[in-house]
Amino acid sequence: MPAKRKRPQKTGASTSANDEKVAEDPICKCNICFEEPFFLTVQCANGHLFCSKCYQQHRECRTTESWKSCPVCRVPLPPQPIRNLLAESILGSRPATCDYEDAGCTADITRGGKAEHVKRCEFGTTECPQQGCTWSGRVSALVEHTALCEFRSVPCTNRGCNESVPRGQLAEHISGECRFRLVELGILQLPQRANV
């Protein structure tokens, strides 16, 4: 019985060399814009790749059904694109740089994980989610800002009051409009219920 051949082990060097070949391979490029598709990768019935955006634009700009065909092999393009999950997987695992690289981000990310990373990148910019607040700054400063934001809703500290008010109006609420505010009566302070 002949000895079994062992498959060569993949090393980091050969994997990165393969990645470079994939990047240069025209098979992984859109057949309309000739760029690597970044999000959804779709194909014609014969497997020619397109960006989903190019695919839709190509179908919509054609006035007759006969022109709604693959620009490579001329097979009709279906109205609903056919996703190419293998191409999406290959392209999604490729390295990418963060949109905030110029601001200092050095995270190792993939194209498939880029959108999620950019949303949470500490070097990215964001706006305060509180209605009425105009603060904007780095994502890493948002927690500190939120703790002090005058527009953030905070609970009233008067015993029995369950209202929440914007932080900037809390002092006014506690001492004035709160139905459970403390009223000075000589030396004692007693809770007073405002007449409703």
Image (spheres, grey):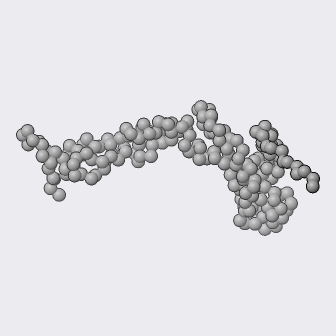
Residue drawn at (37%, 45%) of the image: 152
Percent of width and height locating residue 115: 61, 47
Percent of width and height locating residue 42: 74, 58
Whether residue 24 is visible, yes or no, is no
Which residue is at the front of the view, 119 or 132?
119
Residue drawn at (86%, 60%) of the image: 73
To which quarter of the image does residue 44 belong? Answer: bottom right
Instruction: Name the quarter where the N terminus is drawn.
Output: bottom right
In the image: residue 7, left or right of residue 141 = right
Which residue is at the front of the view, 146 or 107?
107
To which quarter of the image does residue 53 belong? Answer: bottom right
In the image: residue 41, left or right of residue 134 = right
To which quarter of the image does residue 85 belong? Answer: bottom right
Residue drawn at (25%, 45%) of the image: 157
Which residue is at the front of the view, 29 or 110?
110
Furthest residue in direction front, as rendered: 1
Percent of width and height locating residue 118: 59, 43
Residue drawn at (62%, 37%) of the image: 107
Percent of width and height locating residue 163: 28, 52
Furthest residue in direction bottom, as rendered: 65
